[in-house]
Image (cartoon, helix red, strand yellow):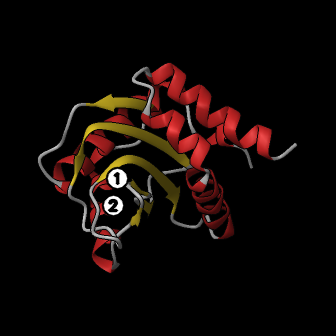
Amino acid sequence: MELSSLLVPSAVRVVSQFTSKKRLFQELGEIAQSAWGIPADPAVDGLQERETLGPTGVGHGIALPHARIEELDRIAGIFIRLEKPLDYDSVDRQPVDLIFCLLAPKDSGVDHLKALALVSRTMRDQSVVSKLRSNPDPAKLHAILIEARSTQEV
């Protein structure tokens, strides 16, 4: 599994700020619809439902919201870099500025977990995170993410 199969350039955005986690999830749903053709409402509902099980803010300013939804036939990723961090109820209580969302089919099983592990490893790489935080161009952010995993797997 490669990040290039999970993340298309149109699913990478830089946003100045969000007023709430709910508004972030709505934006993720809108991006899912425009970039992947996934209906926004089930995506938003799935993300909110998953968040009730426990926060997906993993610390160090990074959140990995994810959900399994019926309307999918593949795993789809969305990346947002926030210019102003959002209070996200993360495990370390720090606001988040890097969000990598994964949406997977309900029956994706182990593939969903593999995708989540791949994204998690990528977002734990401090050099990748530094590049993401210092770059305001969505096309370059996409390239950084795609390149990060391919160079680490060599």
Residue tagged 2 = 47
**In the rendered image, the vertical position of residue 46 relative to residue 96, given as above or below:** below
Callout 1–callout 2 Cβ contact below 8 Å: yes
SS type, badge 1? helix
Near mark 1 (Cα within 10 A), the count class, few <14, some 14-19 or many ≥20, is: many
Residue ID at (45%, 32%): 11
Mark 2: amino acid? Leu
Q: Where is residue 45 in the image (x, y as percent from the top left)?
A: 27, 60
- Residue lying at the far left in this picture: please name it: 19
Residue ID at (27%, 75%): 52
Q: Is residue 92 left or right of residue 70?
A: left
Residue tagged 1 = 43
* Quarter residue 30 falls in: top left
**In the rendered image, the vertical position of residue 112 relative to residue 151, given as above or below:** below
Mark 1: amino acid? Ala
* Quarter residue 66 falls in: bottom left
Number of labelled discs?
A: 2
Q: Quadrant of the C terminus?
A: top right
**In the rendered image, the vertical position of residue 108 relative to residue 151, given as above or below:** below
Q: Which of 65 and 133 is in front in this view?
A: 133
Q: Position of residue 149 (x, y in %)?
A: 71, 43
Q: Which of 78 and 90 is in front in this view?
A: 90
* Quarter residue 62 falls in: bottom left
Residue ID at (31%, 44%): 29
SS type, badge 2? helix
Q: Position of residue 107 (x, y in %)?
A: 58, 67
